[in-house]
Image (spheres, grey):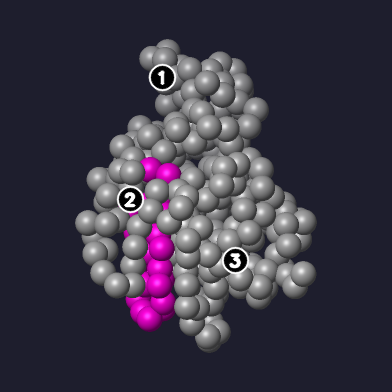
């Protein structure tokens, strides 16, 4: 992800902060899955969260590890402000601006507390084309034997929408996400052992294609228009029409999610 990509996504997610949690049903379940993967392991002392958003995973981490020092970070100031308003817990929970992609050094506040016993990121890493670079960055901040609770979406996420966007007039060639085999390969090459991995599929029926696009906008899940055909009025009408024609189901249209969640352990040197 380039600096341009980071700025675009940070801006989009910041604008979505007010509505994000009203739409983030799948993301909330992914946060629950990550905490469940921890099981009965001893609680970490220092926790770093990447991409905290409005605090879905942050809240779960700070409650599960109530004695741990948790530093929640995000590249979007809008998201950070929303999380800070909802999760004001002085003494154990702090916030800092941080891009998690890995192309730049960590922020001073993040580096000062390293190394961390646990790093966590919920529904974030699908936006990083170079997953290995991100995982190496996470490893550089993790103590020996430390862990990473991480979730994201597969490249096969939203197959209905992607099928349309891969065709003219859009012709997108890059789709966000990492499939399970790619996650395991990147983890092994970046100094992580995969201790547990879950992936699943969830289908939902929304009233119309417009409801699909509105939900994605409210979640901040909008592709940079510079990567493919622009969404002008004619293209938008084409997309809505074709989505309704091809993916009608019951009284609405189908949307398929393909999330995953993993527990990684930093390999011994």
**Residue 216 seen:** no
Q: Nearer the viewer, mark 3 or mark 2?
A: 3
Q: Are marks 3 and 2 in contact (CB under 8 Å)?
A: no
Residue 227: x %, y % from top left: 56, 24
Task: Indicate which disc, 3 or 1, sits on the residue closer to the N terminus.
Answer: 3
Residue located at (64% from left, 61% from top): 139
SS type, badge 2: helix
Residue 103 shown left or right of residue 83 in the figure: right
Query: Is the residue 7 above or below the residue 227 in the image?
Result: below
Out of 110 and 214, give the one closest to the viewer: 110
Q: Distance from label 3 to label 1 (Cα)? A: 48 Å
Residue 220: x %, y % from top left: 39, 40
SS type, badge 3: strand
Q: Nearer the viewer, mark 3 or mark 1?
A: 3
Out of 5 and 200, give the one closest to the viewer: 5
Residue 205 shown left or right of residue 257 in the figure: left
- Magenta extent: 52-76
Q: Which residue is mark 3?
A: 142
Residue located at (49% from left, 36% from top): 6
**Residue 27 is a magenta residue:** no
Residue located at (60% from left, 26% from top): 172
Residue 14: x %, y % from top left: 33, 40
Q: Which residue is mark 1?
A: 237
Q: Distance from label 3 to label 2 (Cα)? A: 22 Å
**Disc 1 crowd, CA 10 A, few/some/many (<14, 14-19, 20+):** few
| Residue 256, numbered label | none
Give the position of the C terminus as an image quadrant.
bottom right
**Residue 4 seen:** yes
Residue 56: x %, y % from top left: 36, 61
Q: Which residue is mark 2?
A: 80
């Amino acid at each position: 992800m380039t600096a341009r990509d980071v700025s675009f996504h940070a801006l989009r997610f910041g604008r979505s902060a007010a509505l994000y949690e009203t739409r983030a049903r799948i993301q909330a379940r992914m946060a629950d899955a990550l905490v469940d993967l921890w099981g009965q392991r001893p609680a970490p002392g220092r926790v770093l969260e990447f991409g905290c958003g409005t605090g879905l995973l942050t809240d779960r981490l700070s409650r599960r590890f109530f004695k741990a020092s948790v530093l929640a970070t995000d590249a979007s100031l809008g998201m950070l402000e929303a999380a800070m308003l909802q999760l004001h817990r002085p003494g154990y929970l702090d916030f800092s601006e941080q891009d998690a992609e890995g192309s730049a050094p960590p922020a001073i506040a993040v580096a000062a507390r390293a190394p961390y016993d646990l790093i966590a990121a919920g529904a974030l890493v699908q936006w990083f084309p170079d997953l290995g670079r991100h995982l190496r960055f996470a490893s550089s901040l993790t103590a020996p034997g430390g862990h990473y609770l991480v979730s994201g979406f597969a490249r096969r996420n939203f197959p209905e929408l992607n099928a349309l966007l891969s065709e003219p007039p859009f012709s997108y060639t890059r789709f966000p996400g990492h499939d399970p085999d790619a996650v395991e390969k990147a983890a092994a090459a970046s100094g992580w052992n995969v201790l547990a991995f879950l992936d699943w599929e969830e289908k939902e029926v929304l009233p119309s294609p417009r409801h699909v696009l509105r939900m994605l906008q409210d979640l901040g899940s909008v592709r940079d228009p510079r990567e493919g055909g622009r969404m002008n009025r004619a293209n938008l009408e084409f997309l809505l029409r074709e989505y309704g024609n091809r993916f009608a189901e019951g009284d609405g249209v189908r949307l398929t999610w393909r999330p995953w969640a993993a527990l990684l352990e930093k390999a011994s040197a």
